[in-house]
Amino acid sequence: MQSIGSPLMWSLFAAFVIVALLVDFFAMSKQGAHRVGMREAAVWSVIWFGVSFVFMGWLWWYLGGTGPDPVARDLANGKALEFLTGYLIEKALAVDNIFVFLMLFTYFAVPAEFQKRVLMIGILGALVLRAVMILVGAWLISQFHWVLYIFGAFLVFTGVKMWWAAGQEPDLDNNPALKWMRRRIKISPIYDGEKFFTVVQGVRMATPLLLVILLVGIVDIVFAVDSIPAIFAITTDPFIVLTSNVFAILGLRAMYFLLANVHERFHLLSYGLAIILVFIGAKMLLIDIYKIPVAFSLGFTAVALAVTMILSLRIPPKGTPGGAYPFGAKKREEERA
């Protein structure tokens, strides 16, 4: 499969990701467990957005966007547009991740000062998972072109399913993964700082924080299955696919804390994401009949997100969903009844 990624470009990108993660880890260890405020989240969100656009500008320049060769300029413009579109789509789909993370943290009553560490571990897992899935997906597409049709049909199905599920609160008590873990793991009813294991009355148990980490990993897998095919509808260049995914994920934690307190205001956003998934799936299914321009895909995604966000602010929710229970609270309430 053709790619613009030279060994130098791959090496520079890998070095950047490693440095970014080390800086993040250093900052987190220095700050310790603390509640992330809106101001801190907003600053880091702006930083990650800025870094992503600087990378896109560097990519455009490196490929000859300012040079005299018209072929190089066309390549640079095309790849920069592919990166921007892929980044925006992955960023939009990450919003759904954020809402699920918020639901998990509420259900398990995860203290705000511990959420930062959980998200950091989740981001590390997501980076590794996405890299593996992208490389496997790129290989499959290069060997079997018809895989694109499977991806497209899956995205259409997922989009329709997301539309019908929008506004409904998932029932975590009946979640198969959670029920399986509860049957096989001794779980402490209380937290013990940021520890994953604790001792209660002489018995070693997992804390609810470990359970949350495992569920966040499962959520990463589920959403990666949606988002990876989506980016392949924009470009099959592994370098663009991976870099746009990684930059979207690196800013995920800051975006979570930025949106955590305002998520209810964007109650219609899931409908917009569902429309985007159906559109991208249709784009894949039509790839051998008509190739929808990347610029149109970018515009469609931006408009769908903007319209649903504006409508969310103008149209109040029909009803407030049932409150989420902290860890074990629902069970205790039922026992009292």
Image (cartoon, grey):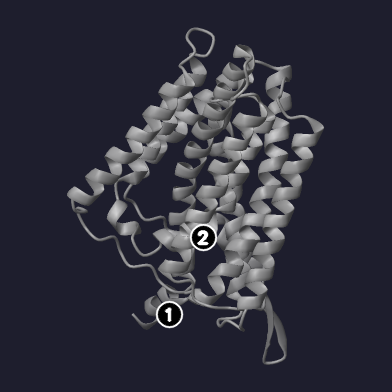
The vertical placement of 285 against 119, above or below, is above
The vertical placement of 282 against 245, above or below, is above
List the residue tagged with mark 1: 332
Q: How many marks?
A: 2
* Closest to the observer, 54 or 126: 54
The vertical placement of 35 against 140, above or below, is below
* Residue 204, x across and y down, in percent: 72, 82
Q: Quadrant of the N terminus?
A: top right
- The answer to whether residue 203 is visible is yes
Q: Quadrant of the C terminus?
A: bottom left
Q: Quadrant of residue 23?
A: bottom right
Q: Quadrant of residue 34?
A: bottom right
* Closest to the observer, 227 or 74: 74
Contact? badges 2 and 1 (CB < 8 Å)? no
> Which residue is outermost to the front?
68
Q: Is residue 191 left or right of residue 124?
A: left
Residue, x 56% and y 61% (percent of image)? Answer: 178
> Which residue is outermost to the top?
289
Q: Is residue 248 left or right of residue 4?
A: left
Question: Any mark on residue 321, and which?
Answer: none
Tell me if mark 2 has few (under 14), some (14-19) or many (20+) residues whose alpha carbon lies within 10 angstroms of its own.
some
* Closest to the observer, 180 or 81: 81
List the residue tagged with mark 2: 44
Instruction: Give, as a three-letter code, the residue at label 2.
Output: Trp
Instruction: Name the secondary structure under disc 1.
Output: helix
- The answer to whether residue 102 is visible is no
Residue, x 30% and y 64% (percent of image)? Answer: 322
